[in-house]
Image: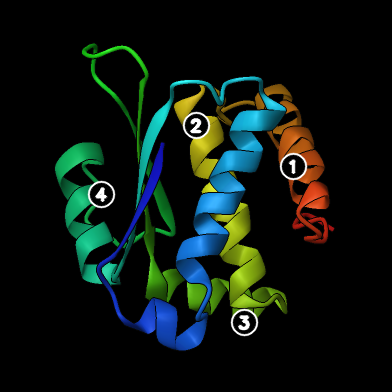
């Protein structure tokens, strides 16, 4: 089950399909990785202040960031975790990169879900592996290569 909570109204003002797009991107990532069955994910579409607070509390970085992923603690089977996205940061990045907010949202939702599945980008090899998956998943959603 994928649940999307839209806390920041600016998401739907700027991208009316934001909730549906985030859920579809998360589902596509799970399907691509063969992890769809029984996984629960919550996606929070929030504002910069919320992401800054989460980033400070859980990562020790007192700044807003585009996406955070929180794997589920050991508990009920099937819980994969939570993904949170910051509207202002995502909107700014999309504009700077010449992308639509909708496409950037889908990219970052996929990125967050891949983090929940254990992917990371701390080394060049890890980044290449993760980015290749992102490209393949996004292509299936009709989203251009975000790294081109």
* Label 2 secondary element: helix
Disc 4: CA contacts within 10 A as few (<14), some (14-19) or many (>=20)? some
Q: Secondary structure at mark 4?
A: helix
In the displayed structure, would residue 14 be above or below residue 70? below
Q: Secondary structure at mark 1?
A: helix
Q: Are marks 3 and 4 in contact (CB under 8 Å)?
A: no
Q: Earlier in the sequence, mark 3 or mark 2?
A: 3
Q: Residue at x 57, y 62 (%)?
A: 21
Q: Which residue is mark 1?
A: 137
- Foreground label between 1 and 2: 1
Q: How is the image coloured?
A: rainbow
Q: Is residue 11 left or right of residue 31?
A: left
Q: Which residue is mark 4?
A: 55
Q: Identify the mark nearer the N-term, 1 or 3.
A: 3
Query: In the image, is 137 to the left or to the right of 41?
Result: right
Q: Which residue was labeled with disc 3? A: 95
Viewer-nearest residue: 139 or 40: 40
Q: Name above or below for residue 22 compared with residue 46.
A: above
Point out the frontmost of discs 1 and 3: 1
Q: Nearer the viewer, mark 4 or mark 1?
A: 1
* Residue 107 percent location from the top left of the image: 63, 54
Q: Quadrant of residue 46?
A: bottom left
How far apart are the two marked residues, 3 and 2, measured between alpha carbons?
Answer: 24 Å
Q: CA–CA distance between discs 3 and 4?
A: 23 Å
Q: Residues within 10 Å of mark 3 (few under 14, many from 20)?
A: few
Query: Label 2, on which residue?
Result: 115
Quadrant of the frame with the C terminus: bottom right
**Which residue sits at x=75%, y=58%?**
146
The first of marks 4 and 2 along the sequence is 4
């Amino acid at each position: 089950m994928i649940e999307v909570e839209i806390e920041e109204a600016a998401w739907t003002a700027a991208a009316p399909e934001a909730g549906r797009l985030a859920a579809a991107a998360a589902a596509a990532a799970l399907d691509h990785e063969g992890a769809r069955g029984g996984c629960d994910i919550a996606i929070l579409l929030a504002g910069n202040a919320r992401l800054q607070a989460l980033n400070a509390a859980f990562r020790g970085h007192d700044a807003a960031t585009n996406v955070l992923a929180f794997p589920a603690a050991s508990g009920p089977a099937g819980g994969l975790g939570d993904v949170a996205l910051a509207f202002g940061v995502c909107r700014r990045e999309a504009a700077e990169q010449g992308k639509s907010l909708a496409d950037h949202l889908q990219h970052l939702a996929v990125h967050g879900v891949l983090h929940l599945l254990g992917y990371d980008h701390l080394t060049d090899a890890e980044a290449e592996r993760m980015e290749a998956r992102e490209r393949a998943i996004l292509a299936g959603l009709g989203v251009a290569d975000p790294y081109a």
